Amino acid sequence: MNAYRWFGRGWLSLGYLFLYIPIIMLIVYSFNNSSQDMVWKGFTLHWYSALMDDHEIIAGFFLSLKVATLSATFSVVLGTFTAYVLNNYRKFNGRALFKGMASAPLVMPEVIIGLSLLLMLVGLENAFGFPQRGLPTLVFGHTVLGVAYSTVVIESRLREMSKSLSEAAMDLGCKPYQVFGLVTLPNISQSLVSAWLLTFTLSLDDVVVSAFLTGPGYSTMPIVIFSRARLGLDPRVNTVAALTILVVTIAVVLSSLYMARKERKRQKEISAAFKH
């Protein structure tokens, strides 16, 4: 039995090493005193100070943060309503089509999504003069992708939620919107945070859709990095990637602490309710 356990732990460790060693190497070489990749010449903070003078990467980084924040927020709002409809209304005309359209971005190549969105937006711009490609089109495109992912995360939590809670609230005189705001949302708050972080990360990382929907002066950080990578990686790319990892790690840690605290609070409330 011990042999099987150590065998499983060994494979798990190899899997984690395969996933995280490239990230660790990237962070380490962001402190490399050399302009060539994989040639270590000592420790330095030069590239971090040089990054402050790279206005293109800085502008792309903050644009990516803005787009990711807006698209993640819109994705969670729309995904919550989509998941609520799919979970609570099992029979209505067009439900299969609605569910298929909600999950289509999960299985459709991003090239197809980006091209179709570009054609639609160009047609709208030719007909009405808006929207011009830039921040609004980037947010719109990333939201289209994010809604599909947030719907899956939130719907799975709604399925686990006991319907007796909503029924009890309605028996006590709550209106449907009150049940949604006072009962449903607090019980799925952890999934909302998870969905927001997932869609935020997907938006921050997206290249394909962004390449179709970006406009002059609106290059996101992945687009800037991708364009520079074709000419050879600039060490400043390592530094901005390391800073991005730091931002995402802090967000994940804070959200994990928040969700753990909410879960402990929920368990205490359930225990107190059973005692009474």
Image (cartoon, grey):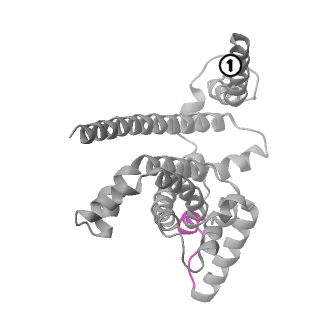
Please give the name of the residue rendered at 26% of the width and 64% of the height, measured from the top-left corner. 171
Please give the name of the residue rendered at 78% of the width and 40% of the height, measured from the top-left corner. 232
Asked whether 192 or 266 is in front, the reply is: 266
Please give the name of the residue rendered at 61% of the width and 82% of the height, measured from the top-left corner. 125
Asked whether 263 or 254 is in front, the reply is: 263
- The quarter holding residue 120 reads bottom right
Decide if residue 272 is on the left or right side of residue 19.
left
Asked whether 245 or 99 is in front, the reply is: 99
**Amino acid type of the residue that numbered disc 1 sits on in the rendered structure:** Arg
Q: Is residue 41 visible?
A: no
Question: The N terminus appears in which quarter of the rendering?
Answer: top right
Secondary-structure class at tag 1 = helix
Please give the name of the residue rendered at 71% of the width and 27% of the height, measured from the top-left corner. 15
Decide if residue 181 is on the left or right side of residue 72.
left
Vertical relation: 257 (above or below) 111: above
Instruction: Please identify the residue farthest to the top as the structure is shown.
Output: 2
Vertical relation: 92 (above or below) 239: below
Would you say residue 234 sits in the magenta stretch?
no
Magenta stretch?
Answer: 129-139
Q: Label 1 belongs to which residue? A: 9
Q: Is residue 6 visible?
A: yes
Instruction: Please identify the residue farthest to the bottom as the structure is shown.
Output: 127
